[in-house]
Image (tube, helix red, strand yellow):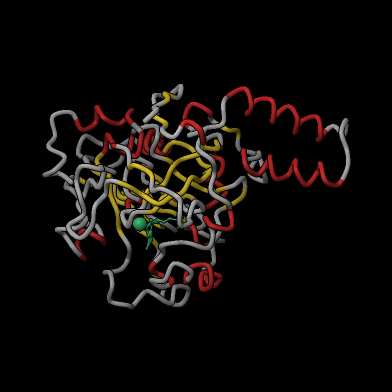
Amino acid sequence: MLIKRSPNGIELPFSSEITPREVFESRRSFIKQLAVGSIAGGALLEMASREAFAQGTPGKLGAKLNPSYSALDKQTAFKDASTYNNFYEFGTGKDDPAHNAHTLKPRPWTVSIEGEIKKPLTLDLDQLLKLAPLEERVYRLRCVEGWSMVIPWVGYSLSELIKKVEPTGNAKYVEFISLADKAQMPGVGSRVLTWPYREGLRMDEAMHPLALLTLGMYGDVLPNQNGAPVRIVTPWKYGFKSAKSIVKIRFVKEQPRTAWNEAAPSEYGFYSNVNPDVDHPRWSQASERRIGEDGFLVRKRKTLMFNGYNDVAPLYAGMDLKKFF
Ligand SMILES: Nc1nc2c(c(=O)[nH]1)N[C@H]1C(S)=C(S)[C@@H](COP(=O)(O)O)O[C@H]1N2
Ligand SMILES: [Mo]
């Protein structure tokens, strides 16, 4: 298998599906040309918008692509990314969130930041949107169930927020708590999980620049079903570590309990780094199905260690990742 190395050390397999940098750049200038009107015509415009969509656009949020943190894999269609979801607060079926999440009210919204920090804060959405420059980051998302997507998120490193609240020496972990409001979320009350949905990271993981405080995708704000108005995305971990619609970020001394770990401790560990060598007790994690590439003849993709984000490897130096799965 051909492995290409991107500027940030992310290993990219399947080179035939990678957009070479030159093609990428020339497409961009083509789109610019269209924008200034030097080329016109309905068909071309239609093509331009499709191209712009494929590469991400500044969009309503005005985020600038951060190429050094972006995978060049072909992006998942917005339609797929916004209709095939896991968000158990709105039901356990893949299409439940898209059907049911219209009852979520993403504004007004506040996130309270508390615990082992010198500057506890409550931030509303506008404050969150202005806390640091918004970036577009194209990340692979690998669900523990064996499928993956490639999504252009909008946000900034979680570390930007962490620095502002000045954690004390006791802050060893960060806990993320999702909204659990039965009035807005018909799935809360079901017994699949204990609510609210909770996730967590070790402090050094949370400080890693790849950990994204996410406020949008595909240039615009997050659709409700994708975790509006604010979620976490940790692309080197299985998707369930990326808690949606968060209302609280708490800095704590001890490793926090998490919703999936409580539900099935032998299946979902605290770390949950993507790891093709550690199988889920009920299925292999060696390969994955990329959403949008379905089809009888389409081969599954090999799952990469840390989902290809090798930059994070030093965080786990000396740890037995079979034990700390
Ligand atoms: N609050 C909450 N966050 C959640 C979930 C959930 O059920 N509730 N599902 C997780 C899982 S299993 C995955 S794979 C991702 C899916 O994110 P997406 O729908 O935006 O692709 O969200 C994660 N975050
Ligand atoms: Mo998942």
Q: Is residue 27 left or right of residue 236?
A: right
Q: Is residue 58 left or right of residue 284?
A: right
User: What residue lies at 24% left-to-right and 41% top-to-bottom?
Assistant: 202
Q: Position of residue 307 (x, y in %)?
A: 34, 39
Q: Position of residue 111 (x, y in %)?
A: 43, 54
Q: Quadrant of the N terminus?
A: top left
- Front-most of residues 101 and 249: 101
**Figure quadrant, ligand 1:** bottom left
- Front-most of residues 308 and 270: 308
Q: Position of residue 194 (x, y in %)?
A: 26, 69
Q: Is residue 192 left or right of residue 324?
A: right
Q: Is residue 115 visible?
A: no
Q: Is residue 5 above or below residue 75?
A: above
- How many callouts does the rendering have? 0
Q: Is residue 7 visible?
A: yes
User: What residue lies at 55% left-to-right and 44% top-to-bottom?
Assistant: 129
User: What residue lies at 27% left-to-right and 76% top-to-bottom?
Assistant: 191
User: What residue lies at 52% left-to-right and 48% top-to-bottom?
Assistant: 215
Q: Is residue 163 above or below residue 103?
A: above
Q: Position of residue 33 (x, y in %)?
A: 80, 29
